[in-house]
Image (cartoon, helix red, strand yellow):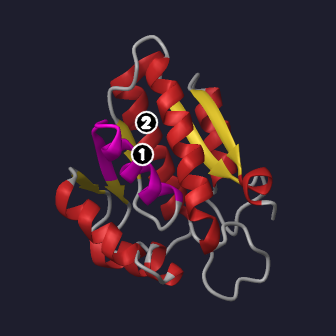
Amino acid sequence: MIDAPGRDQPRFPADQAEVARLAIRETVEAERQRPGGVAFGIAGGASGGDILFHEVCAELRIPTRLYLVLPSSQYKTQSVEPAGGDWAERFDRLAANLPVRVRAESDERDDGIWQRANLWMLHDALAAGGENVTLIALWDTQEGDGPGGTGDLVQRAREAGARTIILDTKKLFGV
């Protein structure tokens, strides 16, 4: 996610969104050149990497599916709006134009909800793509702020046999 204003230790500063978008685009384009290409993409809708991934895929005419762990309004409050800027409007456009899957009807009030969301997306991708699944992770390679972080998802994807590509934000952004 894009850092909320005033974050003590920057991970994804808002002014680095274009750098991230270019790295995501380059990676998706390279994946398209692999045998079998890219059938579709799956991602959440958080400000930053998720939204950028969906937008890049749309530019490249690759269909995507929007996976939300919470109903749209709750998801937006927790994972989109803290970034400010035009992220909420971009999220709304995606939600209006993509197939949307919602996992929970309300905030389940436990820290495991984000981890379960990652596993849900990974399992659905594996079920649809088998050994042809690639996880593209825009990640600083550090522990997250809580359960369900990117590191856990990367580890589980590797264990399941998925190809993993890490776009290291420390290197991309210099933070």
**Which residue is found at the position 47% from the left and 19% from the top?**
33
| Mark 2: secondary structure | helix
Residue 123: x and y, percent? 43, 36
Give the total of numbered labels.
2
Q: Which residues are magenta?
A: 49-66
Q: Magenta includes 115?
A: no
The residue under label 2 is 123
Q: Magenta includes 65?
A: yes
Quarter of the image that includes the C terminus: bottom right
The three-letter code of the residue at mark 1 reads Trp
Main SS, magenta region, reads: helix
Q: Residue 4 appears in which quarter of the rendering?
A: bottom right
Residue 10: x and y, percent? 75, 73
Cα–Cα span, label 2 and label 1:
5 Å
**Which residue is found at the position 51% from the left and 61% from the top?**
114
| Mark 1: secondary structure | helix
Residue 131: x and y, percent? 48, 17
The residue under label 1 is 120
Quarter of the image that includes the N terminus: bottom right
Q: Is residue 71 visible?
A: no
Residue 100: x and y, percent? 24, 54
Q: Nearer the viewer, residue 68 or 165?
A: 165
